[in-house]
Image (cartoon, coloured by chain):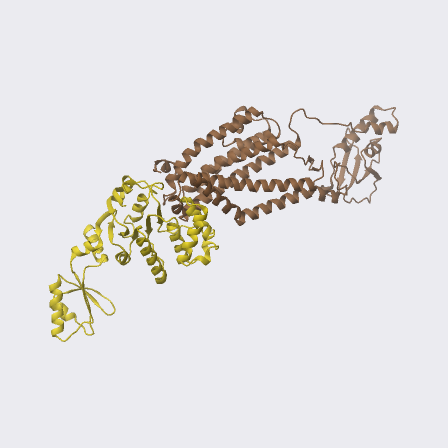
Amino acid sequence: MSLTVNDFVKKYGDKAAVDHLSFQMKNSGVFGLIGTNGAGKTTTIRMMLGLLSADQGEAAWNGKRITRESLNFGYMPEERGIYMKTRVAEQLEYFAMLRGMKRNDAKKSVAKWMERLGVSEYRNMAAEKLSKGNQQKVQLIAAVVNDPELIVLDEPFSGLDPVNTELLRDVIDEMVKNGKFVVLSSHQMPVVEDYCEEIVLLHKGRALLSGSLRDIKRGYGHTNLIVSCEKDVSEIADEAGLIRIGARANETEYKITGDKMAQSFLSAMISKGVYPIKYEIREPSLHQIFVEKAGEDA
Amino acid sequence: MNQIFTVFRFTYLDAVRKKAYRISTIIIMLLILILCLIPKVVGMFSGSDTAGTESEITYSGSLYLSDKNNLIPGGEQALAALGYQILEANENTELSDNELLVEVEKGEGAPIVHIMTSNFMSAPDDGPIVNALTTAWRFSLVGSSLTPEEFALSQSELGVIHEISGGMNLTGYSLGLVFTMLMFFAVYYYGLSVANSVAMEKTSRVMETLIISAKPKHILIGKCIAMGAAGLTQLIIIFLFGYAAYSSLVPHGSMLFGIELSFDGLTFTNTVILILYFLLGYSLYALVNAVCGASVSRIEDVSSALMPVSLISLASFYVGYFTAILGNATPAIEIIAKYVPFASPFGMPFRILNGSVTMSEIATSLGLLLVSIILLSVFCARLYAASVMFYGKRLKIRDMIRLKP
C-alpha cells in the first residue's frame, strides 16, 4: 500500500496556495506534513482527500485516484466541526453510517472508541456541554470510527492538555501498530519530530524538504552541542569558537562545526576542572532546519 | 441512496426534536383552539344559543322620534316596522348606548333628518332609517288610501336570496386567501430553515466532516427532503388538530364576520393537490435556499444571501394574492400565477379551492413545477458542491459557477 501525491497545484487568483507539490508514503506509520500557518498544509490535505479540486496533479492510493468510494479514509479537520446541539453518540453514529457502516456496527464502533478515549459518560449529552478537549476527542472518533486505512489528522494536538496528548499519542501508536497510514499535519515542529518518520516541509505552498526525518537530520551532521554545568563556561566556549544559539534554565545550546570542535571544548572544560552535568552532541532540531530553510527561501 | 436516507433520517429527527419546532407547533395549535372557540364565546356574549345557528344582525335599541311639525306623516309607523321601539323625545332626553334620537326639521325643500347617538360605536346603519322616512314622506306627498297596516307592510323589505352559479363563494374566497397565505409562510419558512441549516453546517465546519463521508448532492437532497418532511409533519399535526377542534367546537353553519366557517371546499382531491403544491413549491425554494446557505462563511450573512430569493418569493406571493383578491387579473398575470414555477404554489391554492381552474391547468402547472425542480436540482447540486468548501467572502452566483466542484 502507498500514498502518492503527484505534482499538486492550487492557485487562488495569482497566488499559489500549493505549488507543484509531490511526496510519497510507502509504508504504514506517521507522515508529517509540516509548515507555518498558511504554508498550504490544509489545502494539500483537502485536495488529497478530494474535498477540493486541484488545478493540477492528483493523489493516489495504490495507484488509484483517491475518492470517497476508492478509499476508506478518516479526516480530523483543523477547525473542529461537530453538531453542538446534537447528542454525541448520535452524531458519531451518523458519521459512521454515512461512511457505509450498518447501524449496529456503527453503534458498536462508537461505543468502543468512546470507551477508549474516556468519553463514554457523555454519550447522551449535547456536544456543546463538553470541554474543548473532549470535543476534540469526539472529533477524533468521527475520523476513526469507520476503521479507515488512511487517517489524516490536521493539527490534532492543539488545545490538548498533557494527559490527553499522551492518550492521543497512544491511539496513534496503536493505529500504526495496526498497519494504518497516518498523515499528521502540524506547525509544531517538536510534535512532528516526536511522531514522524517521514516528513514534507512546506513553505509558501512548496516543499522545502521531504523524505526520512532521520536522513534529513543526518545530512546536516552534528551541528549542535547542549551543555549543562554548575559553573559558567561561556569564556571557555568563546575560546573554543562555539556560538551560543540558545539558553534554557539549566543548559546552553551551542552551534558547532563538527565533533572535533565539541571534543576540544570538552577537553578545555576538563582541563580547567569543570565537569559538565549534561553534554550532548546532536543534529539540528527540525525547528532549526525549518527556520534555516525558510530563511534561505525568503 | 443509503447516504440520502441516512442524511434524511438524521436531519429529520434533528429538526423535529428542536425546541423551536415543538414550541411553534404548540403555539399554532393554541391559536387554532382560540379561533375555534370564538363562535362559542361570541354566542355567549350576544346571548344567542351556543348551538349557534345563523346569526342575525338586528338593532335592539330604542328610538326617540321628534317630528313636532309632523313633517313626515307615517314616519313613526315606518320606523316601528324596522323593529325599533319608538319613544317620544322631549327636551331632557339623554341618550345611552343603543338609543337613537331622530329629529325631523324643516328644510328648504325636503325635511332634514338628524340622527343622533351617544357615541360612534353605537351608531346603527342609518340607511334603512333614511329609506323608511323618505318613503313615508314621499307617500305623504302623493297621498294614499292605504290603511296604516298596509302602509307598514309596504315598508317591509323584500326577501332576497343570493345564489352563485360559479364555484366561488365568500367561504371559498376566504379559505382560498387563508391557504394562499399559509402556503407562502410554509414554503418560505421551511425553505428558510434549509438555508440556515446548510449555513450552520458550513460555518461550524461540520461540513468538512460530512463531505468526506458523503457526496454533496446526497447531502443536499437528503437535507431538503428531511426539512420538507419535518415541515409536512408539522402541517399535518396542525391540520389534524385543527380539524378535530373545528369538528368538536365549531357548530355547523357558524359564521364569523358574516363568513360561514366551513371547509367544504377542502375535498380529498383538493387536499392532495395542495399537499403536492406545498411539497413541490417547498422543494423549489429549498434547493435555491440551500445554495444561498452554502455561499456564506458567516451565519450573519445568510439574510443578505437570501435577499434575492426572498424578493422572488414575495413578488410571487403578491402575484397570487392580488390576483385572488382582485379577481380580474390580466391574462399575462393570470398565466404567471398559474404556471410560473416560483409563483404557482402561491397562485394556485386560491383557484383550486374556488374551482376556478381545470384539472388540465393544474396538471400543467404541477408538471412545469416538477420539471423546474429536476433541472434546478442538477444546477443547484453543482453550485452547492463547489461552494460548501469555500471559505472567505460571500460568494456571488457567478463566483459559484466559476468554482470547480
At 35% across and 45% down in the image, what residue appears? A72
Q: Is residue B100 left or right of residue B195?
A: right
Residue A163 position (above or below residue B188): below
Residue nearer the viewer, B172 or A184: A184
Q: Is residue B102 left or right of residue B223?
A: right
Residue nearer the viewer, A50 or B401: A50
Q: Is residue B205 left or right of residue A25?
A: right
In the rendered image, residue B84, in percent from the top left (x then y), is placed at 81, 37
* Quadrant that contains the C terminus of chain B: top left
Residue A22, picture quadrant: top left
At 43% across and 31% down in the image, what residue appears? B375
Q: Is residue B38 left or right of residue B136?
A: left
Residue B80 position (above or below residue A287): above
Residue nearer the viewer, A148 or A10: A148
Residue B183 position (above or below residue A18): above
* Quadrant that contains the N terminus of chain B: top left
In the rendered image, residue B172, in percent from the top left (x then y), is placed at 64, 32
Colour applied to chain B: brown
The number of numbered badges drawn on the structure is: 0
Colour applied to chain A: yellow
At 24% across and 44% down in the image, what residue appears? A21
